[in-house]
Amino acid sequence: MQAIQPTPLDPAEKERLLEEFRACLDAWEAAPNEPGPGAEPLDLHTLLAEMAALKSEVRLQSRQFKSALDELRGYGERLNAHNQRLEQELARAREHSRDVRRQAERKVLLELIDLHDRLHAGAQAAARSTPSRLARWLQPGPARLIERLAEGQALTLARAEQALERLQVRAIDAVGQRLDPERMRAVAVESDEYAPDGIVLREVRRGFLHDGELLRAAEVIVNKKASHS
């Protein structure tokens, strides 16, 4: 079998092909390492320096954040302490206001009780002055006037007692009870052989409670049996 002989290239065509191959090699070698416009070549020293700078910046920002967090925590603690002081001051102010109100109420109630005592004494005096049947027959005009005055005193006393009851004020039941030092004050003693020692025989001045608390102590006469030698 006869071998085929290649056709020889034209010198000009050969030169063109060589130029194209050379241009491809130059482009391949320059493409991977060619820096962009204005860029500096990157080496290991530059990379480590940039990483160290970035680490320092992160550390600085962390310290700044911790400082801001500590300052915010301190502000919160100061605000909490201020709120606690304010609550304590408000509690003291409310307690002071209650004390002032209780003192004012106590003063008014004691004045009402004093008025009640006067009305009670007047009603008792009017009851003792009630004219007899003979006096009413002999002097019907004055007798009727005295009776009306006594009725008016009793009615006024009843209204005063109703007002005290509405204000949660009630009298202390002392007569016949054993002396209670917290609610009663003995101003005198008498001897009654039929009553136990320490029993209240009579009231000199009635005592009162306001909503369960002592408003005025009762002044009483207490029994003390005579000793037999």
Image: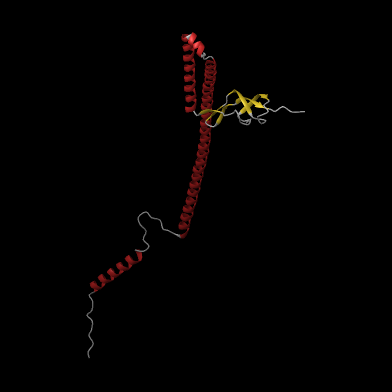
* 221 or 83: nearer the viewer: 221
Residue that extends furthest to the right in the rendered view of this protein: 229
**Quarter of the image where one finds residue 217:** top right
Residue 174: % across, % down: 59, 28
- Asked if residue 110 is positioned above or below residue 26 in the image, the reply reads above
Residue 202: % across, % down: 61, 24
Residue 207: % across, % down: 57, 26
Judged left or right of residue 201, residue 152 is: left
- Asked if residue 192 is positioned above or below residue 73 in the image, the reply reads above
**Quarter of the image where one finds residue 203:** top right
* 109 or 204: nearer the viewer: 204
- Asked if residue 180 is positioned above or below residue 137 in the image, the reply reads below
Judged left or right of residue 195, residue 47 is: left
Q: In percent of the image, x 50 and y 14: which residue is there? A: 133
Q: In percent of the image, x 51 and y 11: which residue is there? A: 135
Residue that extends furthest to the bottom in the rendered view of this protein: 1
